[in-house]
Image (tube, rainbow, N blue to C red):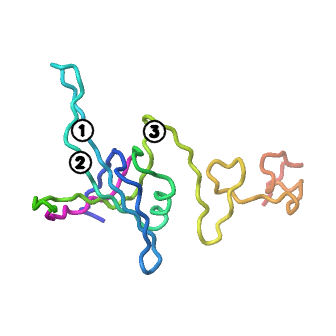
């Protein structure tokens, strides 16, 4: 949609993702991402931490379920999404505050200081199951018994018996 502010935030999860379901059964997850700027102080030869900026992030449907299964408190993440207008509120001690909210489009662990193992989920609606050795998990399972060995379309990597086009 035109006019939306898209941002990317790199930070750490302040808590475990909170997965809930609406009355209609739609998954929604909420998480807090904290990002603390660091600057190098040349006079003291040390790194100084700035004030932490906390952003409340929300994701829906399959993305929400994937986040809840994959991420935990303290995980460094890269989050991209649409920034919502800041909402003002009053803290318990009477201090006026504002919170930033981000509707997540994409999220993943930061691989700067960690490794990750990615497992693709099967699509809903009867999509084919993943085949062993298929890195994207989207190739249909091939049944060798249902296709003859001399079928050029079933075995595109094999040489055909003639130079004729198969049309």
For the N terminus, the image quarter is: bottom left
User: Residue 119 placed where, x, y %?
Assistant: 59, 51
Q: Residues within 10 Å of mark 2 (few under 14, many from 20)?
A: few
Q: Are marks 2 and 1 in contact (CB under 8 Å)?
A: yes
Asked which quadrant contains residue 41, the reply is top left
Q: Which residue is mark 2?
A: 53
Which residue occupies 85% across, 60% down?
A: 147
**Alpha carbon separation for disc pair 2 and 1:** 9 Å
In front of the other: 146 or 50? 50
146 displayed left or right of 39? right
Which residue occupies 56% across, 44% down?
A: 117
Q: Residues within 10 Å of mark 1 (few under 14, many from 20)?
A: few
Relative to 110, is 146 above or below? below
Q: Is residue 78 magenta?
A: yes
Mark closest to the chain's N terminus, 3 or 1: 1
Q: Secondary structure at mark 1?
A: loop
Relative to 141, is 24 above or below? below
**Alpha carbon separation for disc pair 3 and 1:** 18 Å
Relative to 112, is 52 above or below? below
Q: Secondary structure at mark 3?
A: loop
Q: Which residue is mark 1?
A: 37
Q: Are marks 3 and 2 in contact (CB under 8 Å)?
A: no
User: Residue 42 placed where, x, y %?
Assistant: 18, 20
Q: Which residue ends up furthest to the front in the rendered image?
A: 93
Q: Is residue 84 magenta?
A: yes
Which residue occupies 50% across, 53% down?
A: 70
- The residue stretch that appears in magenta: 77-90
Mark closest to the chain's N terminus, 2 or 1: 1
Magenta stretch prevailing secondary structure: strand
Res. 111 mark:
3
**Alpha carbon separation for disc pair 3 and 2:** 21 Å
């Amino acid at each position: 949609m035109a006019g939306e502010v898209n941002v990317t935030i790199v930070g750490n999860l302040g808590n475990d993702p909170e997965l809930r379901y609406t009355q209609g059964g739609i998954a929604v997850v909420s998480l807090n991402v904290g990002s603390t700027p660091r600057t190098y102080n040349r006079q003291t030869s040390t790194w100084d931490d700035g004030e932490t900026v906390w952003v409340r992030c929300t994701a829906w449907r399959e993305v929400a379920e994937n986040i809840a299964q994959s991420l935990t408190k303290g995980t460094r993440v890269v989050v991209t999404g649409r920034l919502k207008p800041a909402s003002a509120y009053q803290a318990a001690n009477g201090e006026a505050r504002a919170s930033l909210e981000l509707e997540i489009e994409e999220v993943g662990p930061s691989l700067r200081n960690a490794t990750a193992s990615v497992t693709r989920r099967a699509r809903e609606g009867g999509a084919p199951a993943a085949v062993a050795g298929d890195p994207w998990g989207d190739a249909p399972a091939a049944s060798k018994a249902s296709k003859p060995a001399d079928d050029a379309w079933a075995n595109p990597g094999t040489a055909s018996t003639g130079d004729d086009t198969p049309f």
